[in-house]
Amino acid sequence: MSRSLFSIHPLAALRVGFGLLSLLVVACKDPVDDDVAPPVVPPTTAPVNWAARADSAQAALSLGFWSPAGQYYLENNAGNADFNYWWQAHGLDVLTDGYQRTKSADYLTRMRQLQQGMKAKNGNSYLNDFYDDMEWQALACLRAFELTQDPDYKATATLLWTDIKLGWNEQQGGGIAWRKSQRSYKNTPANAPAAILAARLYVLDRNPDDLAWAQKIYAWEKAKLVDPASGLVWDGVNRLGDGQTDKDWRFTYNQGTFIGAGVALYRATQQSAYLDDAIRTANYVLNDSQLAPGGILKDEGNGDGGLFKGILVRYLTGLATEPAVSAANRASYVSFLKFNGESLYKRGTRRPQFLFNTNWTALPGSSVESSTQMSGIMMLEALADLQARNVL
């Protein structure tokens, strides 16, 4: 049975009565006379949807850069139909990004079309004079195979890997040559991606020969083209036939591929030294005023340079998502990637066309090269991936 107010102890009832009276007085006060300001309700903002932004970027690549007749990516969105072999490899990679994120069959169709068109434009062959170009194609095919289990991708990667290994020679103490017609010139673009490829093949097939190749290539790269004091990765040695190292060529993608090689070998061996190397180089990039002035990856121009930042972003994202990386380093890498992505989206993207600039702090003109467009997609896909992992 409920008790009435007056069935409570008299003093308690008195306190309750005064309390009710106070509430009544407050409720009846004229709000104009109240000196207390009403609470400020913060404006609600919808969370950034990086996947939707990546969708828009992918659509722009398909709409403005694809050759329906040739089934490959044109040089630019202004109709230049020049064919760039290694750009197509990164085209396959960004399509694979889209498929990994959405599982849409449209990406699978375009991936197959691109492989057919690229081979036809390359003289009905996947082989090429440049070892680094073939490495990019092999890496993209291997990743496509891992996601789709389509054996054609694996067969292409294996074909290319067999040819790539022939590029190793003892000039400059080892290393894979940059191209078949210049076997004495060795550089990071031809060696760090080869180490990634060999390590990933080992993880997939457990062929000890692949691991031996990965470790041999990596050891040569680290000894010849990585600054032992800072972790900065140099470009190449003996380009002019003089035995000199191009230490002044500071390209973002050289740092990215060495980071990727360290992560790939760590995953293949669980040896922490490889991961430590990747972390040291990554931390150098984040704090270097030439590679990332003001915290934004530098403008490396059109042409091949348009792809460089995207490659760094891809492999830095791989490092950021490696479970063995410390929470502090992970937070640093994610923050850096987000800062770059937001700058690209807010300052370096022409909308509604969704075209990207080589400079991620300024709007592009009306003509954009597919290499540059692909780099921008890599950035947005990376952030969509980090957001899906709940680490952004």
Image: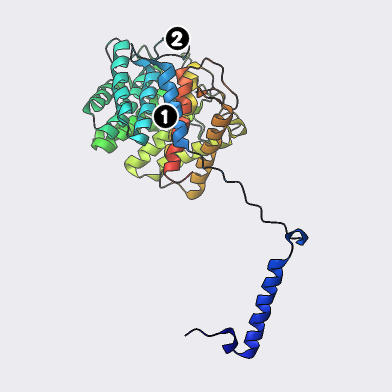
Where, by quadrant of the figure, is residue 126 drawn?
top left
Depth check: give the residue in front, 342 or 221. 342
Q: Is residue 372 above or below residue 26?
A: above
Residue drawn 58% across and 37% down?
287
Query: Residue 158 appears at what percent x and percent y?
Result: 25, 25
Relative placement, left or right, of 229 versus 196 is right
Query: Residue 261 appears at what percent x and percent y?
Result: 39, 34
Task: Report the amino acid beneath label 2.
Answer: Asn
Where, by quadrant of the figure, is residue 260 drawn?
top left
Q: Is residue 267 above or below residue 301?
A: below
Depth check: give the residue in front, 233 or 91. 91
Dot placed on the residue nearer the N-terminal end, 1 or 2: 2
CA separation in Å, label 1 and label 2: 36 Å
- Whether residue 13 is visible to the viewer of this picture, yes or no, is yes
Reading the image, the residue beneath label 1 is: 221
Reading the image, the residue beneath label 2 is: 80
Say which element carries label 1: helix
Where, by quadrant of the figure, is residue 87 drawn?
top left
Relative placement, left or right, of 357 versus 214 is right
- Whether residue 127 is visible to the viewer of this picture, yes or no, is no
For label 1, count other residues whose C-alpha is less than 10 Å away and answer few (under 14), some (14-19) or many (20+): many
Task: Report the amino acid beneath label 1.
Answer: Glu
Residue drawn 68% across and 67% down?
27
Query: Residue 109 appears at what percent x and percent y?
Result: 29, 24
Depth check: give the residue in front, 237 or 163. 163
Please tell me how many numbered marks the rendered image carries: 2
